[in-house]
Image (cartoon, rainbow, N blue to C red):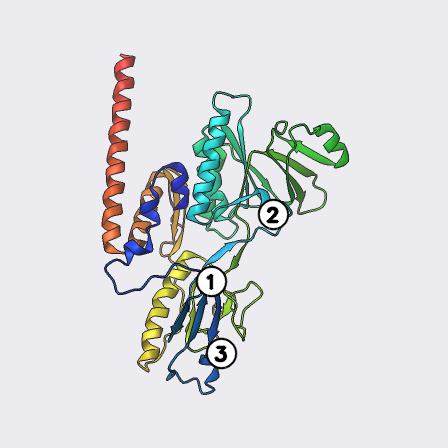
Amino acid sequence: MLYELLSGEVDAWEIAPRFLDLLANTSVQFVQDRVKFLQPSDHLKKNGSTRLSCGGRVQLESGQCIEYDWLVLALGAEPKLDLVPGAAEFALPFSTLDDAWKVDKRLKILEREKFGKPSSPISVAVVGCGYAGVELAATVAERLQGKGKVQAIDVGTTICSGAPPGNREAAMKVLSSRNVQLYLGYFVSCIRKADKFEDLDQLISTLKGKDTVGEQPHGGYILELQPAERGVRSQILEVDLILWTVGSKPLVPEVEPYVLPVNGRGQAETDETLRVKGHPRVFAIGDSAALRDSSGRILPATAQVAFQQADFAGWNIWAAINDRPLLPFRFQNLGEMMTLGRNDAAITPSFIEGLTLDGPIGHAARKVAYLIRLPTDEHKVKVGISWLTKSAVESIASFQSTVTKVLSGS
């Protein structure tokens, strides 16, 4: 729900509670640190026995060393910004709370700089039109409300190519209503800082055959777009802010002196019980795991998959400790949902074919789904009360505004 931070719909404590708060009344010991490397020892047992005094060690950057009997890798992933020259220097990712704060801060600066200057609107580029890119584009476009424009770029010819048709149609409707410009079938070949004294005519002549889109650059950034297919002309976009939602890389740590079996993306290869192959004491879930379904395809790195894997991993660790059979993981697709602004969302449940809830109904249903997913009952209650209070305040404010308009009109 990082998108709702940009729209001001939620507060950070509601969607990103601290571990120290969540674990305050538990026996869980929380350590905030970075993993330097792993030293598993379970692979030394040829017979796969779990009767080991220690499953291995985790060496932290602070110097602390933690011995473990069982290990779960659930490190998630980080944005991959080395795909395009200039992306790491000039583009902002959007996958963590810190990322959301940085984007919000940058938007506030631009809003102040452009306030009262209709001739110089804010220009925002969103690279990637998957779920994250579309949700981000819709949210930012709603926030700008005519004070700027949003341009979304994707190498594919359609947005959210893997989404259910209902979600995709709802998203296209919202993006169109907010005048989001789509550049489908293009990839970003280069990003660079724009010199405010740069002569665009000279730039165009040096980049033969490329079109220009937008206003004269004013200390912003230039994106060079190349078509994915022949016969289409290149484009140049000039923007104030670049938001990056393309590509990610898992954070599986270095293993000494051996190497975990990983795929080309850096995910640990697991068997169907979520144990890392060759390491009976190590489990991996979420972005850290490369688990294939019955058709041989790796399961998508989504929150829905990770949530379900967590339940299986917890059970299988208990089963392994007690010499019980381990359960093979089976993913149950519950459907897909996306936010499209303060009162817009789209939900397509898998158990009702052809049904898509969009608009305010979809928005309410999505918030309920996320409320159920919050980590503790206490936090759910606090957030539920907060959201109900905010909804009541907004309803009263809307009613007062309507009454004021009616009375002033009479």
Q: Residue drawn 73% across and 28% down?
A: 201
Asked whether residue 170 is in view, the answer is no
- The quadrant of the rendering that contains the C terminus is top left
* Amino acid type, residue under disc 3 in the picture: Gly
Extreme residue in the bottom direction: 47
Q: Residue furthest front?
A: 63
- Gap in Å between the C-alphas at discs 1 and 3? 26 Å
* Element type at mark 2: loop
- Mark 3 falls on what kind of element? loop
Q: What residue is disc 3 on?
A: 278
Question: Which quadrant of the structure image shows residue 139?
Answer: top left
The image position of residue 305, as x and y in percent, is 41, 61
Q: Nearer the viewer, mark 2 or mark 3?
A: 3
Residue 155 is tagged as 2
Sequence-wise, which precedes: disc 1 or disc 3?
A: 1
Report crowding for label 1: few under 14, some 14 to 19, many 20 or more residues within 10 A (C-alpha): few
Q: Position of residue 365 (x, y in %)?
A: 32, 46
Q: Position of residue 149 (x, y in %)?
A: 52, 31
Q: Is residue 309 above or below residue 405?
A: below
Query: Residue 346: image x %, image y %?
Result: 40, 45
Instruction: Name the amino acid type tagged 1.
Output: Glu
SS of the residue at dot 1? loop
Crowd band around label 2 with a 10 angstrom C-alpha radius: few (<14), some (14–19), many (20+): many
178 vs 76: above or below: above
Q: Can residue 318 be seen?
A: yes
**Label 2 to label 3, Cα distance in Å?**
38 Å
Per the image, the residue denoted by label 1 is 61
Total labels: the figure holds: 3
